[in-house]
Amino acid sequence: MKIVLLGPPGAGKGTLANLLKETFDLWHVSTGDILREEMKNKTKLGKEVNRYVDQGALVPDEVVTEIIKNKFKNNGRLQQGFMLDGFPRTGVQAEELDKILSKEGQPLDFALYMKASLPVILGRLTGRRVCRSCGSLYHIINKPPKKANVCDECGGELYQRPDDNEETIRTRMKVYTKSTKPIIDYYKKQNKLKTVNADLDAQTVLTVLMSILDENKKSHQHKNSR
Ligand code: ADP
Ligand code: ZN
């Protein structure tokens, strides 16, 4: 499976990817996670992107595209499949991705648009907590840790992302509507868009995705046998 996840912040892209990883040996590439790791380690790149990420603004296209280019170049994992989460986020990035993938001869299967409504998004983002050590995701109501502020997986400390406050969430939503939402059309035109109702819980979204994958496989087999 070679897919990108599209959808507003809080649609559950990371949660879905984590669920899938439990079943498949899946390569999950999250630009948000990569950038936060760089920031945590105070690398040159991390320092460069810090102000954008913390304010909920987009990191410049060249910077993120370069990250993806380097990750995908001559990488054997590409043909096993991947799930891109948080990239592309602009029309330019979508076009760059197509270029990168066609160079590697590994075109995208489809884009999964996780459509979520505003109240659901706000509830998810304001209640989200993240493990500082392993990145596991929690929610103070929907998925609380067994012990307050402690990660079930690794015992690490849970924190609230600095960009998960109401003001920055509003900025991220604006950025999403202006820059990212238009690329839904880009994939629609390529006949590669699949939409799921991401207001539903992650397990249900996963079930829907599995049936989409199944249909996709069948229609390919059908095409090839004709
Ligand atoms: P969410 O989907 O919850 O908004 P992410 O973890 O995907 O969060 O991204 C967090 C931040 O990282 C974004 O607000 C943005 O600043 C930066 N970022 C991540 N991916 C990209 C990208 N493809 N292009 C530009 N900026 C990005
Ligand atoms: Zn942890």
Image: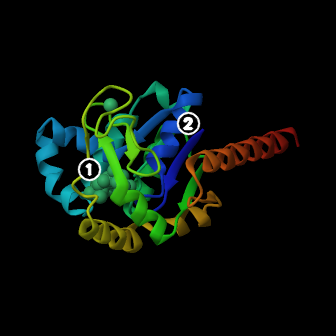
Q: Where is residue 206 in the image (x, y as percent from the top left)?
A: 62, 45
**Label 2 SS:** helix
81 or 172, nearer to the observer: 172
Q: How far apart are marks 1 and 2 (CA)?
A: 24 Å
| Cβ at disc 2 under 8 Å from ligand 1 | no
Up-down relation of residue 184 to residue 97 (above or below):
below
Number of labels in the image equals 2
Which residue matches tag 2?
20
Question: Which is closer to the viewer, label 1 or label 2?
Answer: 1
Q: Position of residue 173 (x, y in %)?
A: 36, 69
Q: Quadrant of the C terminus?
A: top right
| Sequence-wise first label, 1 or 2 | 2
Q: Position of residue 48 (x, y in %)?
A: 13, 50
Q: Identify the amino acid type marked 1.
A: Gln
Q: In which quarter of the image is the N terminus?
A: top right
Residue beneath the point at 60% across and 57% down: 200
Q: Where is residue 152 in the image (x, y as percent from the top left)?
A: 38, 30
Name the quarter showing ligand 1. bottom left
Question: Residue 126 shows which numbered tag?
Answer: none
**Farthest residue in the right direction?**
226
**Do callouts 1 and 2 mark residues in contact (Cβ within 8 Å)?**
no
**Is residue 102 visible in this depiction of the protein?**
no
Q: Identify the amino acid type marked 2.
A: Leu
33 or 88, nearer to the observer: 33
**Label 1 SS:** loop
Residue beneath the point at 40% across and 53% down: 96
Residue beneath the point at 38% across and 63% down: 90
Q: Which colour scheme is used?
A: rainbow
Residue 16 lies left or right of residue 135; in this view the side is right
Up-down relation of residue 30 to residue 95 (above or below):
above
Which residue matches tag 1?
160
Q: Residues within 10 Å of mark 2 (few under 14, many from 20)?
A: some
